[in-house]
Image: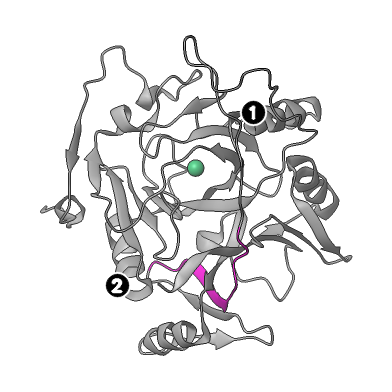
Amino acid sequence: MAISGIEALVYGVDDLDQCSRFFDDFGLTPVSRTPQDAVFEVDSGSRVVLMRRGDPRLPTAFSHSVGVHETIWGVDSSASFDRLVADLKRDRDVRIDADGVAHFLADDGMPFGLRVWTKRTVLSVSDPVNTPGRIQRLNQHRQWRARCRPKTINHVVFFVENYRASWRFLRDRLGFRYSDHSRDIGVFARADGTFEHHSIFLLDCKLPVAPGKAGFMHAAFGVDDIDELMIGANYMERKKWANTSRNSSGGVSRHRISSAIYYYVDCPAGGEAEYHADTDYLDDNWVPRVWDFKFGSLMWAHRVPPMFAGDDIPWDMQFDASGASLEEKKA
Ligand SMILES: [Fe+2]
């Protein structure tokens, strides 16, 4: 293994106070605050870094979009770091800064960083669930939680011009694994040192729900279970942070691909922040699948974007162990 997940998401923001208040309300732990930047973290040690737009430390955002300007991937050892950097240097500029972050651009121009990182172990314990006839909690109440506190950063999502080409870079140069393919929509890919279903989702920027150009879409933060997700959703609503109004499905629901429960919040730093619970966890024994996008995307959602809606969506999933569905389509 080499890449153990998202070490940091670096946002460029216009209103540092407002964006700091958002991530505080969202449940992240504040680490530091200066007039120029704010840093938050989750239990795994993954960070959200907010910098004022125009800060010389901030890379130009992918396709000049708002939101995440740079995704920094954590690397498990200096040997892995040196190997990845040496390979990247064969055909692109790699700048290593004073903090040890290697900055570079992917083939599609997406700003990435690599950094040696020890991911903290997170142990979440969810309560047993009672169902009619199956009592798993007798004379025992559930945990009483005060706030939603995301534990991990599970994935980041970008619109891209050619998701098949962008995927090949992740596979061939950074060792990412193929999780699933939403046919003609996008690819879900997992860093080789993680178990979350996907660390990144790359989707076609020319879709009707997309902005027509490449850029950031959302970031997903892992919480313990549906209870913690509910607490977060209700707290954010009370704090007047709106449930998504743009690209994604509103309300609380599950995706079929990855099985994850989700709730999206419009983020003043750009795009959306997603609470994410009960996702599938994968290792290299997983057999990737290719899905009809309507069948795979949403299960019981309300306020469904029109392109995902339909009264009679056929069940459509095939296994795709070889990744043949991601080969470039013949013109
Ligand atoms: Fe997501």
The residue closer to the viewer here, 165 or 22, is 22
Q: Name the image quarter holding residue 208.
A: top left
Tell me residue 162's x, y (percent): 31, 56
Q: CA distance from mark 2 to mark 1?
A: 39 Å
Q: Residues within 10 Å of mark 2 (few under 14, many from 20)?
A: few
Report the front residue among 257 and 130: 130
Where is residue 254? Give x, y as percent: 46, 28
The kind of residue tagged 2 is: Asp
Badge number at residue 259: none
Q: Mark 2 or 1 closer to N-term?
A: 2
Residue 190 placement (x, y as % from top left) = 39, 57
At label 1, the amino acid type is: Asp
Q: Which residue is mark 2?
A: 172
- Residue bounds of the magenta highlight: 108-121
Image height of 18 relative to 141, above or below? below
- Helix, strand or loop at label 1? It is helix
Position of residue 105 measured from the top left corner of the image (x, y, whole percent): 47, 74
Q: Is residue 15 magenta?
A: no
Nearer the observer: mark 2 or 1; the answer is 1
- Residue at 23 percent of width and 44 percent of height: 289
Residue for badge 1: 227
Q: Residues within 10 Å of mark 1 (few under 14, many from 20)?
A: some
Residue 152's place in the image compared with 70, above or below, is above
Furthest toward the left, the residue is 330
Using residue 89 as the reference point, say whether residue 320 is left or right of it. Answer: left
Against 92, residue 175 (above or below) is above
- For residue 271, above or below residue 4: above
